[in-house]
Image: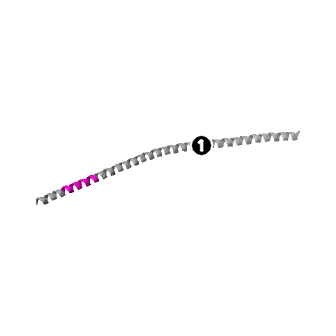
């Protein structure tokens, strides 16, 4: 009867060991799952932060692009006005020169 008891104790020890091993593995898996869930939360928070930063930067980029395009239009308009004024000034100089030449001729004819 003694060997049977040893065999029975060995079997009970084996079941206890198997149960303890399962519990340890379960605890390890739950711990790893908990850590993974925390990491997912951290990554989601970082992603939200990056998305907010990106959205803000994109809005700022669009704002500066619009300002740049407006400045280009202003520059083109200013160049157009400058060219028109130069042409007008040149025309006035030519007209003035023609009047001066005519006056000079009139003076010579009177002499």
Q: Is residue 98 magenta?
A: yes
Rendered image quadrant of residue 38: top right
Which quarter of the rendered picture does the C terminus lie within? bottom left
Q: Which residues are magenta?
A: 86-100
Q: Mark 1 = which residue?
A: 40
In this rendering, position of residue 6 left or right of residue 42: right
In the rendered image, the residue lying farthest to the left is 111
**Residue for point 78% across, 40% down:** 15
Name the secondary structure under disc 1.
Answer: helix
In this rendering, position of residue 84 left or right of residue 35: left
In this rendering, position of residue 97 left or right of residue 11: left
Q: Main secondary structure of the magenta part?
A: helix
x and y percentages locating residue 67 in the rendered image: 40, 47
**Residue for point 87% across, 39% down:** 4
**Residue for point 33% across, 50% down:** 80
Q: Is residue 93 magenta?
A: yes
x and y percentages locating residue 46 in the rendered image: 54, 44
């Amino acid at each position: 009867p003694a060997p049977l008891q040893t065999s029975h104790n060995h079997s009970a020890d084996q079941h206890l060991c198997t149960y303890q091993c399962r519990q340890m593995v379960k605890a390890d898996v739950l711990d790893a799952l908990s850590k993974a869930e925390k990491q997912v939360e951290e990554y989601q928070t970082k992603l939200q932060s990056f998305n907010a930063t990106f959205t803000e930067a994109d809005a700022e980029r669009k704002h500066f692009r619009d300002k740049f395009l407006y400045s280009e239009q202003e520059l083109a308009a200013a160049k157009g006005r400058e060219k028109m004024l130069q042409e007008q000034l040149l025309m006035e100089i030519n007209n003035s020169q023609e009047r001066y030449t005519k006056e000079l001729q009139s003076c010579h004819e009177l002499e």
